[in-house]
Amino acid sequence: MTTADGRNQPTTGQLALDGGPPVRATPPRTTAPPTDADLDAAARVLRTTRLGGPDHPEVRRFEALLAQTTGVAHAVAVNSGTAALHCALRGLGIGPGDEVIVPAHTFIASATPVLMSGATPVVVDVDAATYCLEPTAVDEAITRRTRAVVAVHLNGHPAPVDLLPTDLPVLSDACQAQGATLHGTSVAALGAAGVYSFWQDKLLTTGGEGGAVLTDDPGIAEIARLVRSHGQQPIPGTPDSHHTVLGYNYRLTGPQAAFGHSQLTRFANTVRARQDNAARLLDLLQDIPGITPPYTRDGATHVYWKFVIAIDPDQFRVDLRHVLRALAAEGVPAAPRYPIPLHRQPVLTRHGRTTPCPTADALSQRLLTLPLPAMAEDADDVVDIAEAVRKVATALRR
């Protein structure tokens, strides 16, 4: 039901899935559109004759600001978060015969770069509260072949890098956590290196695809720059270059870098708006039985790239898929969060090493991602989202 000012009144009773009135007529907006400044920045480069290349000035400019805002010495821009993690692994010298520990509850691209490096991903279980790596599971998976740990800062929440073994290099997969901090430090600055993704719906994007390696280690940065551009390196004392390592075309383009630089200049405001909307939604969901809102551990800041809630299967008379259909009918489309954990993904059961992951298995049947408005002007939509969750949870509880 809609009021005279266009807002929706709280709705109870029959679910829209069963023929009742929906909470919303249209889904909430969850991604901030590009600004005129973003578009003008990309267009300025598009009007030139130099759009890409191994050493584009716009890429260098973007890298400099990215390193400064992250608090690291080196930023190496590439064309995806997957490429960034591959470059970082190569920078650590990871290769055939090595093992790299990865969490079971994450996107596949946290593990496949390990395979791309010729190494073996070892999939371990996660924490039931943060959904990030479980330190004890990491300890138990270590062998004489273990060379690194990929710590995924999931959904915008920091992984427990401070609780992991100190004798193993940690790669901070911050592709979902731009702007998150742990004990005051950017999560991308933790460990031997961090990686970002600039995919289209991330808090910071370079216009659809993109990524970066962030590190204080000049050796890792040097290898990442070589790998991203066909392993090409100048021959000292000559105008020529040669190819010294196996590389790829992982380069970011000039227009993408200019777009990303424009976004980065207002990034603090982007993060703040999302956190403010998340705080309001957290408050509205606290007292709904059967629903567990996102958790934030002490010392961590959560940026809520995904606002993930858990349903208690003992309190619902239907499964997760039915809850998702009911929310969609109310005008609040939600999505399952990693319904097939990594230890059950065919590519990793064939080419990796998996360990028992009961928590990840349980989470696959309990977690869903709610839409979260990305902009301050959409804050009122949070009320509708919470009302839809309350309506569905009330109707479908046992």
Image: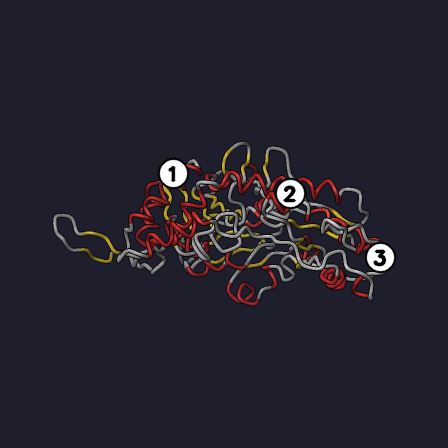
Amino acid tagged 3: Ala
Rendered residue at 36%/44% (across/down): 63
Separation of disc 1 and disc 3 at Cα? 53 Å
Classify mark 3: helix, strand or loop. helix
Residue 285, placed above or below residue 210: above
Give whichever of discs 2 and 3 has the lower sequence position: 2
Q: Nearer the viewer, mark 1 or mark 2?
A: 2
Depth check, front residue: 204 or 32: 32
Left or right of 133 in this view: 393: right
Quadrant in which the N terminus appears: bottom right
Amino acid tagged 2: Asn
Give whichever of discs 1 and 3 has the lower sequence position: 1
Left or right of 366 in this view: 398: right
Mark 1 neighbour class, 10 Å CA radius: few under 14, some 14 to 19, many 20 or more: some
Separation of disc 1 and disc 2 at Cα? 33 Å
Which residue has dot 2 on it? 277
Left or right of 219 in this view: 269: right
Depth check, front residue: 122 or 51: 51
Which residue has dot 3 on it? 395
Q: Residue 216 carries which label?
A: 1
